Image: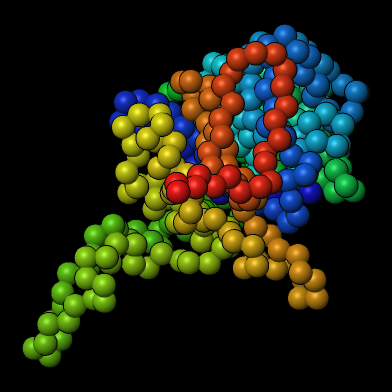
Amino acid sequence: MKFGCSSFSWETADGCHLLGRTYDQFGDLRANRVISVPEGIPCAARLTAEGESVPGRYRYTGMAVLGFGEPILVDGVNRAGLMGALLHYPEYAVYAGTAAAGTTAVHPGRLLAWLLSRCGSVMEAVDALSKITLIDEPVQGKPLAAHYLLSDRTGEAVILEPDAGGLRIHRQTIGVLTNSPDYIWHRTNLRAYVGVTNLPKAPQTVAGHEIREFGERLGGGFGLPGDYSSPSRFVRMAFLKEFAVRGQDEIDGVSRMFRAFAAVDIPEGLAKADPDYAVYEQTLCTSVMCAESGIYYFAPSQNRRISAVRPTGGAAEFALGDTQDIDYRN
């Protein structure tokens, strides 16, 4: 099981804190659902019935992959404002075989549910992480290689990466995450793009001739990488987070965040898995969540209309939708 994906956090002018992500994968969304889990529902730490299961303190809503036992939560937000996203971390993720003494064994695919059901903030989540061990429990015969981006109503963005030395917790990050390599590598790689701005380049004089760039006044972003690799998507997301207009309030910010993700959206056909088979990695869904309202917004690739689930009612499960919803105006 592989999730590509790009994710970043930001804040609107009126102080709403948002976290969004693209969900990139081979295949489709038939096994995916948006789930809403009320407080008090037991939250299992493992995909199987084994291990610890404790009633949750907080309601949470997010997208999950079903069919492997307990739902694999790939992103979500709880009623207290903690938000999180799971992204694929191939060749770098390292898990323990068994839980360390005095800790709870947690499956990587259950970590977000475990945190969202019991932690009300990034600070509480960081404290809870000292009491768990992420364990190597295969899904479809392979470990679920993942790293995570967390944020909350303070705006802090924390990145969690299970490496050979244990679970590395990066505090006060820039709030951008894609896939491998690790966060420190990506942050260092940004040094190659420090000259990229949202401004056009000034004219230059060459041998007495004034030379202007093509597309005058549209030169912002010159030098950004344009491919769909993890390093290139990270650079583009960092550029967008810095320069994109963030919106005045929640709805404005959510709308603009969906638009910003277009820069890393992978259309079907551009990332082929194998030269002999018509199988492609593509962006299957985009989601945005708000820490203050607890609302989870999503738009699958086959229906670009934004849907939303509010943090109310009993336990619920929502299909993502696989048909285009077109608003005919005549």
**Which residue is drawn at the image coordinates 31% and 32% (left, top)?**
248
The residue at the far front in this view is 330
**Which residue is drawn at the image coordinates 90% and 23% (left, top)?**
49
**How has the structure been colored for display?**
rainbow
Res 169 → quadrant: top right
Q: Is residue 69 visible to us here?
A: yes
Left or right, 329 with reference to 159: left
Vertical arrangement, residue 301 with respect to residue 318, above or below: below
The residue at the far bottom in this view is 207
Foreground pick, 49 / 214 = 214
Foreground pick, 240 / 265 = 265
- Image location (x, y in percent) of residue 19: 50, 35
Left or right, 55 with reference to 242: right
- Image location (x, y in percent) of residue 9: 46, 37
Vertical arrangement, residue 57 with respect to residue 238, above or below: above
- Image location (x, y in percent) of residue 210: 12, 82
Label total for image: 0
**Which residue is drawn at the image coordinates 27% and 65% (left, top)?**
218
Vertical arrangement, residue 307 with respect to residue 313, above or below: below
**Which residue is drawn at the image coordinates 53% and 38% (left, top)?**
306
Foreground pick, 43 / 283 = 283
Foreground pick, 197 / 61 = 61
- Image location (x, y in percent) of residue 97: 86, 37
Res 66 → quadrant: top right
Q: Is residue 158 visible to us here?
A: no
